[in-house]
């Protein structure tokens, strides 16, 4: 049983990296399943396997490692992308049915976590069981985000930009609620966590799709490289700042 919190602190840069990672998951998942023509089923198997390997490494680590942590976030995003596409296109469930199934799964995971651990807080995860609930919830939320983002972009008529603006607006309201209301912070966190995935999904589509379809036409390879560079730069920056603050505390 772990007694050390190995989860990243929730700061402004946490959300920046979360959006970069989930958007990268969208573009990298599409790169494997579509650009490289591997297929959704095979892509899902490959990416879920990578997720399982990365989460096992995370669970076995004895302290917080930013590279390991964000690798798991990234693998849940890529796996979530292909899992959602597999449900929608291979199983022909459609975005709406797929989203409803995933919402139900996510709520069941959160309910089981709450009953088992008496809390859904992510700032004080000290047991392996709580961490397992955390990563399972993230996997379902990222898969849900892809399905919901595709629904907003394709079926709702909003398009890629419209979907991103809508989700971005809701996220802005959540930020205001966090600062100016007494709404439960854990509830706000998980709402924002779920919504950053469809924001990343629609933003990923905005980056990769052709201009004729409302995108910016960077392609899956170009978009993945840009997002990966932003994510690595953010991880290095936050890790450097945290080390500097720790050194200052020790010297004092």
Image (tube, rainbow, N blue to C red):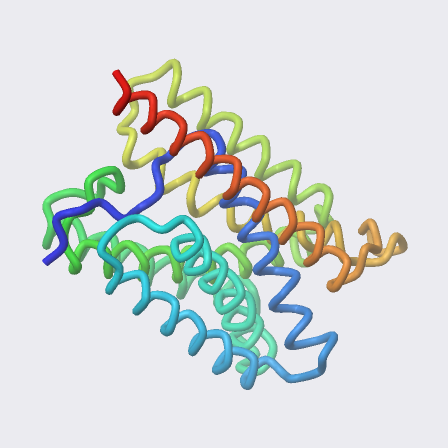
Depth check, front residue: 79 or 155? 79
In the image, what residue occupies the spot 54% across and 38% down? Answer: 16
Q: Residue at x 45, y 20 (%)?
A: 176
Residue 232 place in picture, x, y as percent: 57, 48
Quarter of the picture holding the C terminus: top left
Q: Residue at 46%, 35% (x, y): give it.
A: 240
Q: Vertically, is 148 above or below 19?
A: below
Quadrant holding the N terminus: bottom left
Residue 203 appears at what percent x and percent y? 67, 47
Q: In terms of image quadrants, where is residue 146?
A: bottom right
Q: Is residue 17 left or right of residue 244?
A: right
State left or right for residue 197 relative to residue 122: right
Specify whether 68 is left or right of 58: right
Q: Quadrant of residue 138?
A: bottom left
> As displayed, is residue 112 above or below residue 86?
above
Residue sitting nearer the eye, 248 or 79: 248
Residue at horizontal 38%, vertical 14%?
Answer: 180
């Amino acid at each position: 049983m772990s007694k050390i919190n190995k989860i990243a602190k929730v700061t402004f840069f946490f959300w920046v990296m979360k959006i970069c990672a989930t958007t990268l998951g969208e573009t990298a998942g599409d790169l494997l399943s579509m650009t490289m023509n591997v297929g959704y089923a095979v892509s899902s198997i490959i990416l879920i396997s990578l997720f399982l390997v990365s989460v096992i490494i995370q669970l076995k680590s004895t302290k917080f490692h930013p590279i390991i942590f964000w690798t798991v976030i990234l693998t849940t995003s890529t796996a979530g992308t292909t899992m959602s596409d597999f449900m929608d296109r291979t199983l022909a469930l459609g975005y709406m049915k797929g989203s409803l199934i995933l919402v139900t799964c996510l709520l069941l995971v959160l309910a089981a976590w709450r009953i088992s651990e008496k809390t859904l807080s992510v700032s004080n995860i000290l047991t392996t069981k709580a961490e397992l609930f955390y990563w399972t919830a993230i996997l379902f939320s990222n898969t849900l985000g892809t399905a919901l983002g595709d629904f907003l972009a394709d079926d709702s008529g909003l398009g890629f930009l419209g979907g991103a603006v809508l989700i971005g607006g809701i996220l802005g309201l959540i930020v205001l609620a966090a600062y100016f209301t007494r709404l439960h912070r854990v509830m706000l966190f998980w709402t924002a966590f779920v919504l950053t995935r469809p924001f990343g999904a629609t933003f990923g589509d905005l980056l990769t799709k052709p201009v004729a379809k409302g995108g910016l036409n960077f392609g899956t390879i170009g978009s993945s490289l840009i997002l990966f560079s932003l994510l690595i730069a953010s991880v290095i920056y936050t890790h450097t700042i945290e080390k500097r603050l720790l050194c200052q505390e020790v010297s004092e």
